[in-house]
Image: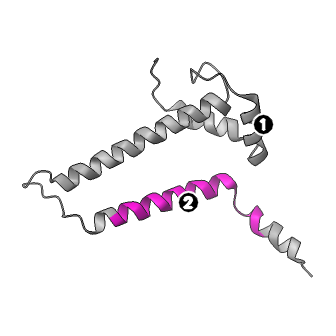
Amino acid sequence: MKTINDFGKSQYSSISRRSFLGKSLAVGAGTIGAGLLANAPTARASGGITSGDAALLRFAAAAEILETDFWVQYNELGGVQDHEVPFGTGNPHYTAAIEVLDEDMPTYIHDNTESVPHFAG
């Protein structure tokens, strides 16, 4: 017979923290996008771009810029420090803390940051 502790273990072992976070962000972004688009007028090829369309594009661009900056900062603190992703010095305390959540987190951060363009500045 399963105890309450056994039930909790099997429930949480079926989904990783990384998978949960990724799915949660995707669902949240989809929900926000659906809410913004629900009352937006549709774009017409012959009618040009409306102010609402431009606002949605600016919002999406701002979200991408913020996400890029977050990943660069995560890598600077806790990603794998190597020549592939510059500007990171690492923070041993931060790295140890995120490894408590997932021992592969520094590699995950590094891999997500590899595709981000880097600018000296």
106 in the magenta segment: no
Q: Which residue is mark 2?
A: 24
Residue appearing at x 57%, y 54% in the figure: 22
Q: Amino acid at mark 1?
A: Ala
Q: Nearer the viewer, residue 117 or 54?
A: 54
* Location of residue 71 in the rendering, given as x and y in whole percent from the top left corner: 54, 37
Q: Which residue is mark 1?
A: 96
In this view, the residue farthest toward the bottom is 1
Tell me the element at label 1.
helix
33 in the magenta segment: yes
Is 102 located above or below residue 36 in the figure?
Answer: above
Q: Amino acid at mark 2?
A: Ser
The span from disc 1 to disc 2 (Cα, nearest Å) is 24 Å
Mark before the other along the chain sequence, 1 or 2: 2
Q: Is residue 61 left or right of residue 69?
A: left
Q: Is residue 116 left or right of residue 11?
A: left
Q: Which span of residues is magenta-colored?
A: 11-35
Tell me the element at label 2.
helix
Q: Is residue 24 left or right of residue 18?
A: left
Residue 1 found in image quarter: bottom right
Q: Around disc 2, counting alpha carbons within 10 Å, would you say few (fewer than 14), some (14 to 19), or many (20 or more)? A: few
**Figure label count:** 2
* Location of residue 83 in the rendering, given as x and y in whole percent from the top left corner: 61, 18
